[in-house]
Every structure is written in structure tokens, then in C-alpha cells.
Amino acid sequence: MKKTVTNIFYNATYQIFIILIPIITVPYVSRILGAKQLGINSFLVSIDTFLGVIILMGLSQLGVRVISRSQLKEDIRENFFRLWKLQLLTGIVVISAFCLFTIFFTKDSIYYWLQIPFLISYTLDISWFFIGIGEIKTVISRNTVVKILALIFIFLFVKNKDDLSIYMLINSVGTMLANCFFWISLRKYISINGRGKKKSLKFFSIDSKPFLPQALVLLIPQIAVQVYTSLDKTVVGWLAGSTELSYYDQSQKIARIVLSIVTSISIVLMPTMAKMDLDDRGEEKLTKILKVSYDYTLIISLFFTCYLSLISETFVPFFFGNNFNPMIPNMRFVSLIIVPIAIGGVFANQYTLAKGMYREYSIPYVIGAVTNIVLNLTLVPLFHANGGTASLIITEYFVCFLRIFLIRKHLSFAAIFKGQVKYFIAILFSLLVGRVLYITNFSSFINIVLNGVIVLFAFGLGLILLKTRVLDDFLMFRKKILGREKK
């Protein structure tokens, strides 16, 4: 349990760092490149992400679960190579197809060729192995170094709107190098060539077929979710143009950053819960942790939804520049996706995946993809970026509802959802206070900070006055800390 808490701390620290990167780069890049150029980049990144999901073959979930449940070192080694062989072969096929498509069907092909390092990085991505063995620190340290270098290169070499290709190259090569570094650390945990007493593995004779059905089952929902998290940008760009796509994509940046922090808890806890499922009392422990995780995920996501919605009018011109003012409504409303995605992640990653319930995990994504396609084709031609935002919000709430509905017979929702009404009352109170006391008298940055403090104070006060678990948990935690200090 101590290692789990440590991993959560490392991951949370890394996610805070991830927040700082776009806070530094996005204002600079949005002003240097402009909405149209960023729209082109968003269009190509959405394609990369979609193809990357195919390359990973569901290993972000399956790989973590299989490795975390492997008991012997030899089992870990064998399972790793059986899983990665699937990833490698898929990567070769996808990259080859992408190259042929670029040669015969694209204009401005230089931008497409610059995406190839991205696709190679997906083929080399074995972060799922390190998460599976609980070595989150390794993943974080490597990525942090590469992201800092990429940040420096962006400021050094991206100087005007004609430097889009340089910006793309820095991001794609940086991502590829980050994933290359994983292989350097791999030798510390498993023997690659089977030295000593360990039997050497002949890579091309490794049988990956036993994992293929599970990988395909997990790949289907991953492809489906990309329809409304990445491929939706392709649709918006196609129907509404690159400028509207830029408004649609950039408005989600901050909400997605917040989500990366909130959902990181689910990623870290999933291997632990998969192991609990093997214990006799695993179900009892799992439900207890799930309740705690759900409560605090809801509290954090409600706060950021309220805060981002409240400050959007001040934040957009300050962060992105005045040229992005038309996307203020997008950012205000897109903050609503934080709650359903975060809550859905709790039940998807921490329960259905940990329990191996791949059907219940997959169905919401597939139905959500179909729903999002229909909504985008209907609303984007009429309302452009705003139509894409509305489609995304409706889809995410529908997916979250399906995720909960499909596991209703497996969990005691009366216990898990107990007390949640108080959280909604507290956030409505803080939203009202934030609106009434909204500060505009100082610089944009100071206004954003002060309004955040007001909302946080009002929300915390509401949680205490309504006698939620927050105060009791804080006092219990403080008591444990003081007890350790006395010892």
C-alpha cells in the first residue's frame, strides 16, 4: 500500500509538471503560429493519436493487468515479450500503410512525414510494463527530462508562423526519444537476451496468439473512444475549417490537463486493484478503495468544472491571446466534460478493467462513438466549433451513464453514491459565491488567481458545513501524521 501511495504522489507531481508545460508553451505558440497553423497541427495529431491507439493494441490496459498479475520474474519476462510482439507487428503494418498513404494521397506531405516519429514512439512505448510492475517513477523521470528539452527547443527554434514544421518535429522526435529511454531501463527488470540461468527467448518464435483475442476486445473500445476524443477533431476540421478546429481543440486543452491529474489516480490504482481481485477478501477491499477514490474524484472534478467555467472570459484572452476570444463559449462549456470523464474513469479503470470485465468496459465506448459521429455530422455544419463542443459534452455524459448502468448488479451503489448530493450542493454554493464576488479589478493573472481562491474557499466551507467526509478524513490523516512524529 505504501508503494501505491508513493506512486500516486509521483504521478500527481508529474501531472502538475504536465500542467506547467502548456501553461508556458501554449500562450507563446498560439501567438507565434496563430489559430490556422495550430488547427493544421491539431488535425494531424488527431490522426497520429488514432493510429497510435491501433498500434498499442489495448496494451495500456491489458499489458498493465497481465504484468501486474504475473507472479514470477520469468513469467513477467515471457509475458512482456509476448505482449510487445503484438505491438511491434501492428506498428510495422500501420507505419507502412501511413507512408504509402502519404506518398500517393497527400498534399503538403512534409507535415505528414514529420508525424512518423510519433508513430514509431507508439511502437516503442512500453510504459504499460513499468506501470504494471509499479515503477511509476521510471516512467515519470524519463518523460520529464525529454519534455523539458522539448520546451527549451520550442522557445529556441519556433519564432514565426512559418515554423510549424519545426514545432511538429520537436514534438514528434521528443516523444520518440522519451519512449526509447524506456528500453534502457528495461534491462534492470528483465533479461532481454536470457543471460545466466535464464532461458533465452527466440523473439520470432514467441507465441502471442493467447493475448490477441483480449487485445482485440480492448482495441475496439479504444478505437471507439478516439472517434470522439481525437477523430472528432478531424471531422470538425473537415466540416468547419482549420480555424474553427483550433478553437474547438484549444478550448479543451485546460480541461484535458485537469483530467490528466484526476484520472492519474485511476491509472495508478488499477494494478493494485487487479491484485486485490486475486485475494479472498479482495472484493471488500476493492469496494472500500473505490468509494474513497470516487468521492475525491467527484470533489476535485466538480471544483475544476466550476472554476474553469467561471474564469473562461478572463482566461482565454490572457492565456491564448485576443485572437482566440471567439472560443470563450467553447471553453466555458467544455469544462462540463471533466465530471463524467473522471467519474467514468473510476468505474472503468479501477473496477471493470481490474476485474477483467472487458465487455462492460467496451460497450460504452462503442455506443459513445456512434452517438458522437451522429451528433457531429448534425451539429458541426450548423454551429461549427460550438456544435463540436456540444456533441462532446452530450457523448461524455451518455458514456458515463452507460458505464455505471452496466455494472449496477456488481456493486453496491447505495454505499458508493452515499453523500454525493452534498458535494453538488456545495459546488452550486461556491459557483453562486464566485459569480457574486467575481473580481475584475486587477491584472488578468491576479484576477484568475483570486477568483480561484474565492471558489476554493467557498467550496471547502460548503463541504465542511454540510458535514461531508472531507473534514473527518483530514483530521484522521493529521492524527496519523502527528502519531508518526511522536514515535
Image: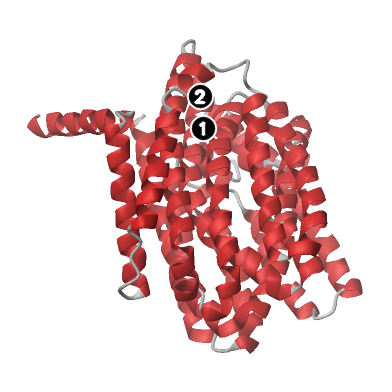
90 versus 474 height, above or below: below
Residue 225 image offset from top left, x and y in percent: 70, 46
Question: Which residue carries the number 2 mark?
Answer: 275
Q: Which residue corresponds to the image point at 41% horizontal and 39% vertical from the top-left?
A: 299
Q: Is residue 481 left or right of residue 40?
A: left
33 versus 124 height, above or below: below
Q: Would you say residue 367 is visible in this rendering?
A: yes
Residue 308 image offset from top left, x and y in percent: 46, 57
Distance from disc 2 to disc 1, alpha carbons, whole Å, reads 6 Å
Q: Which residue corresponds to the image point at 84% horizontal and 71% vertical from the top-left?
A: 102
Foreground pick, 191 / 138:
138
The answer to whether marks 2 and 1 mark residues whose Cβ atoms lie closer than 8 Å is yes
Q: Which residue corresponds to the image point at 76% horizontal and 34% vertical from the top-left?
A: 217
Q: Secondary structure at mark 1?
A: helix
362 versus 105 height, above or below: above
Q: Amino acid at mark 2?
A: Lys
Q: Secondary structure at mark 2?
A: helix
Residue 189 image offset from top left, x and y in percent: 49, 42
Q: Which mark is residue 260?
A: none
Q: Is residue 294 left or right of residue 112?
A: left
Indicate the quadrant containing the N terminus: top left, top right, bottom left or bottom right: top left
Query: Hey, which quadrant is residue 445 in on the image?
Result: bottom left
Q: Amino acid at mark 1?
A: Pro
Question: Which residue carries the number 1 mark?
Answer: 271
